[in-house]
Image: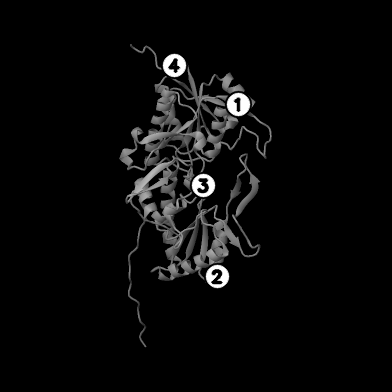
Amino acid sequence: MKQSNKIFKGKTLAILTGGGDTSALNSSIESIRNRASMLGFKVYGIRHGWKGLLGDGDVLDLTHQPYDGWYGGTALRSSRTNPFPSKKNPESRVPQVLRNLERYKIDVLVSIGGDDTNGAAKKLYETEGIPVIGFPKTIDNDLRTRTIHLCQGTQTEAVLCPGFPSAAQAIMEFTARLKTTAESHSRIMVLEVMGRDAGWLTGTAAFGGASMGLIPEVEMSRERKDFFFELVKEAYMKSPKKSLIIPVSEGVRWYDEKTGKLDVVYASSEVDEYGHPRFGGISGVIASEISQRLKIEARAQITGYFPRSGACSAYDRRLTMTLADKVADLLLREEYGRMPVMEKITPYVELEEFNTTSIDMGDVGNKPLPEAYFDINTYSFNSAYMDFLAHILGKPAFPEFEYDFPVVIPFG
């Protein structure tokens, strides 16, 4: 029988982005919009995340509008608004959300975000029956997507989230650039990288020339600190150019000699509506202790928002389009409360819908860096993690100035 109209003609799908921005958000929005439009949906964009569904609402029409998916960040903007009660805001704003979904006649909601944003969407689906589809997003790469990485016959549960590939490329390039400064001054550079609970992004500095690193998964007790400093001194002395780059996650738990406590370093005591404080400054603490203990010049460098900024990488672009294909499949099946994910780590050319699956949004949670990727005895990222990164970044590409100049001996 001939279909005279598009399947979802007369229906409206809305997209929102919540939490921290990434370089892949606009690409995600555009890709989802294009596929939903093809199916007949009118497509709206909700500005400022869940905040755009409060009060009178803040909604844009994206249907048939030009959209630059290569441009980083999110044109819909973002916020860390939590519609459900929290310590910071005990009032439930769910009635406002429901009211605006009705007022704007939104039939399906796609939330692009991490565990917090998609967790709120899942809760709306479970408690209010709102048709939602989650879409993964995080530069930390710590959402449990259940993506399998096969390396040398061993299967490891990995993670692959839009935003991470662009951020990984940025950290690789940042590290490679910093390497020349470290060599010029014979310094140890402690490079601070975003990563509240997981060291996935920190490890990408190895593709830029970093030799060892510290991650939240390994708490740095007094004993571990002592061992770490011994390794740092040994690695520095063996280095031909007397320089090292040591990437550290912002969420590293570090033993404080003065207080006798093991804790993260806080940039601020304030918390967001999901209860998260702002970390920052661990690199300065570690660099200072290296200088004092080892008598080696050390400096701290915070990458800050750099890995979250800038244009979407080609890999991220392909990844968002592939996962958006799966969103179209979920819409056709009317399978809500789910999130599209890559089923396995594949080469770039195999980023296609047939390698995707979907998982229940309630099963997302957080996924730390697997022990199989990090050698705690050397504080380094091993060959299995390098293989994982190679699927995303290709080969490590950092410059080397190869030289061995002869030393001049004075006469007399």
> Which secondary structure lies at badge 1?
helix
**Few, some or many residues within 10 Å of mark 4 (<14, 14–19, 20+):** few
Mark 4–mark 2 Cα distance, whole angstroms, equals 68 Å
Whole-percent x and y of residue 249?
51, 53
Q: Mark 4 points at which residue?
A: 9
Q: Earlier in the sequence, mark 1 or mark 3?
A: 1
Q: Do the residues labelled 3 and 4 touch (CB within 8 Å)?
A: no
- Amino acid type of the residue that numbered disc 2 sits on in the rendered structure: Arg
Outermost right residue: 90
Question: Which of the marked residues, 3 or 4, is nearer the chain's N terminus?
Answer: 4
Q: How is the image coloured?
A: one colour
Q: State which quadrant residue 382 falls in.
A: bottom left
Which part of the image, by quadrant, shows the C terminus? bottom left
Say above or below: 76 vs 299.
above
Q: How far, Cα to Cα, is label 4 from label 1?
A: 24 Å
Q: Nearer the viewer, residue 176 or 281?
A: 281
In the image, farthest residue toward the left: 349
Q: Which amino acid does label 1 sit on?
A: Val
Give the label, 3 or 4, closer to the camera.
4
Residue under numbered circle 2: 293
Q: What's the amino acid at mark 4?
A: Lys
The answer to whether residue 319 is visible is yes
What residue is pinned by disc 1? Answer: 97
Q: Residue at x 45, y 20 (%)?
A: 41
Q: Evaluate if marks 3 and 2 touch, with contact meaning CB atoms under 8 Å apart.
A: no
Pointer 4 or 1: first along the chain: 4
Q: Which numbered dot is residue 305?
A: 3
**Mark toward the start of the polypeptide (3 vs 2):** 2
134 versus 270 height, above or below: above
Question: Given the current orientation, which residue lies at the most extreme front position?
Answer: 154
